[in-house]
């Protein structure tokens, strides 16, 4: 039997979803126009009034919001209700600049946790599971979101937070954790640490992992699944829309269902702002249809992906987003060529290397330098210099054919690249230091 957390809405016919979206959007635009001066100004400037928004298709008439707007309006400028109605603040990780803060009413917390509960059930979770949450707790949304979702499902929850890998392993083994929640890079590290301590994948009781908060490739998924002996599910979200659980993977493990009764998604051309048809690659834009504290309309995420509404074998009807290949601001332009870290990860894992790597971009004599440091797996270590050099040359060629430009490859000893307990730092771009 298939399991859902909220079957009726998760499997609702498309027409039903559109009906819900129409109603919620109308109400939300009115609320935001009346309560949020910042957004009212944007609408007035564009010449749009709340009564112009009658159906979800009218959403195209609304102005976009960007992270710059959030920074400008910091801290209270986009608050959607009286502060006394809010019960929580969370904040972004600040991956790409100054942090932004988001406000939640109890209603917002409930809907967020329900979205996370849907993700846990989709990964096979029931009230018999022991869920180990090693996303960070605190201002970061990862820990609190999955923690709340796990409670809703009735799982026994281990609120570990990130770090202290020794203790993570001890609790995982002693308390028979069955579902692991953390960033994919930390999951890979836990897998590696278990192996180092002599544990085989079948020695733990884990059956599934719910991993997100940073881009990861299919190759990384397979590598984590093998090292932990689990099925690894992707989960997506951002603080601006609530946190993890905006979208989650089902048993098909092929794209994430967006909880579109709460979040309406569009794909736009990042250069022109034009809305693109289903199936096109572009920038993901979200509208919170029923959040009260921080009700963002048409928020540009900078995440690049594709939306598709194909029938899914899991029975869920909500639209799916592909794994974001990275943010538009993760993209490096090196010697004029667009490069995403995820492309490099794909090559590495395909060629049998570890997912422990770091990209360093710099400038020397007005030319970009592009170096990739990759750890050797213990079984790849060799004393023969020419062996290592041959490996480096072959990786360089594989990278060149994927990217169109060849980085300088440096194979380094096992364990020499710092492990991340939260979001991994893959790129060090030193070019701005010279400007
Ligand atoms: P910050 O923008 O400071 O990192 P958040 O902690 O809110 O703030 O992170 C949200 C961002 O994390 C998303 O916009 C996206 O770029 C990235 N992200 C979250 N989940 C995933 C995922 N499953 N795959 C790829 N990227 C993800
Ligand atoms: Zn599905």
Image (cartoon, grey):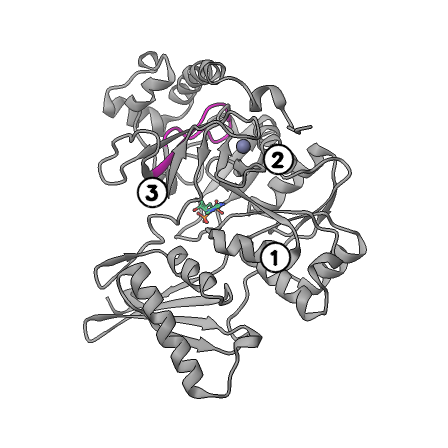
Q: Position of residue 357 (x, y in %)?
A: 46, 67
Label 3, residues with CA under 10 Å away: few <14, some 14-19, many ≥20:
few
Label 1, residues with CA under 10 Å away: few <14, some 14-19, many ≥20:
some
Residue 191 found in image quarter: bottom right
- Which element is circle 2 on? helix
Q: Position of residue 7 (x, y in %)?
A: 62, 23
Q: Is residue 274 at least partly visible in the picture?
A: yes
Q: Earlier in the sequence, mark 1 or mark 3?
A: 3
**Residues tagged 1 and 2 counted as in contact (Cβ below 8 A):** no
Residue ranking furthest to the bottom: 384
Query: Residue at label 2?
Result: 122
Q: Is residue 139 left or right of residue 283?
A: right
Q: Is residue 371 at least partly visible in the picture?
A: no
Q: Earlier in the sequence, mark 1 or mark 2?
A: 2
Front tag of 2 and 3 = 2
Q: Position of residue 66 (x, y in %)?
A: 34, 38
Secondary structure predominantly adopted by residues drawn in magenta:
loop
Question: Quadrant for ligand 2?
Answer: top right
Residue 222 found in image quarter: bottom right
Magenta span of residues: 283-298
- Say which of 220 and 45 sits in front: 220
Q: Name which residue lies at 34% across and 30% down.
A: 278
Using the image, tell me which numbered label, if any, was put on residue 226: 1
- Which element is circle 3 on? helix
- Answer whether residue 69 is magenta in the image: no
Query: Residue at label 3?
Result: 68
């Amino acid at each position: 039997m298939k399991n859902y957390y909220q079957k009726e809405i998760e499997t609702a016919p498309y027409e039903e979803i559109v009906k819900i979206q129409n109603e919620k959007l109308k109400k939300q635009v009115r609320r935001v126009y009346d309560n949020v001066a910042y957004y009212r100004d944007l609408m007035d400037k564009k010449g749009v009034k709340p009564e112009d928004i009658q159906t979800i298709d009218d959403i195209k008439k609304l102005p976009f919001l960007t992270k710059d707007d959030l920074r400008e309006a910091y801290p209270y400028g986009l608050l959607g209700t009286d502060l006394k109605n809010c019960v929580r603040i969370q904040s972004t990780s600040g991956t790409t600049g100054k942090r932004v803060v988001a406000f939640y009413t109890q209603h917002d917390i409930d809907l967020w946790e329900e979205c996370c509960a849907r993700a846990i059930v989709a990964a096979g979770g029931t009230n018999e599971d022991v869920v180990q949450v090693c996303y960070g707790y605190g201002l970061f949304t990862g820990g609190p979101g999955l923690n709340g979702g796990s409670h809703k499902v009735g799982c026994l929850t281990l609120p570990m937070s990130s770090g202290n890998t020794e203790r993570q392993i001890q609790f995982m083994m002693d308390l028979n954790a069955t579902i692991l929640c953390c960033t994919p890079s930390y999951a890979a590290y836990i897998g590696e640490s278990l192996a180092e301590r002599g544990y085989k994948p079948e020695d733990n009781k884990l059956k599934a992992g719910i991993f997100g908060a940073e881009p990861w490739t299919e190759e990384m998924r397979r590598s984590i699944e093998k090292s932990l002996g689990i099925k690894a599910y992707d989960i997506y979200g951002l603080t601006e829309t609530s946190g993890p659980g905006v979208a989650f993977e089902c048993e098909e493990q092929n794209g994430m269902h967006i909880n579109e009764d709460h979040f309406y998604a569009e794909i736009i051309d990042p250069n022109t702002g034009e809305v693109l048809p289903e199936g096109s690659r572009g920038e993901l834009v979200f509208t919170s249809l029923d959040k009260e504290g921080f009700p963002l309309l048409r928020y540009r995420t900078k995440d690049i992906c594709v939306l598709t509404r194909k029938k899914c074998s899991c029975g869920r009807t909500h639209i799916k987003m592909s794994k974001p290949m990275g943010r538009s601001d993760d993209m490096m332009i090196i010697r004029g060529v667009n490069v995403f870290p995820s492309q490099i990860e794909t090559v590495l894992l395909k060629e049998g290397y570890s997912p422990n790597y770091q990209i360093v971009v710099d400038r020397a004599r007005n030319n970009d330098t592009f170096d990739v440091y990759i750890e050797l797996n213990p079984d790849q270590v060799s004393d023969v210099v020419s062996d290592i050099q041959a490996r480096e040359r072959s990786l360089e060629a594989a990278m060149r054919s994927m990217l169109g430009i060849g980085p300088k490859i440096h194979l380094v000893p096992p364990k020499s690249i710092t492990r991340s307990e939260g979001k991994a730092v893959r790129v060090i771009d030193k070019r701005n230091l010279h400007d």
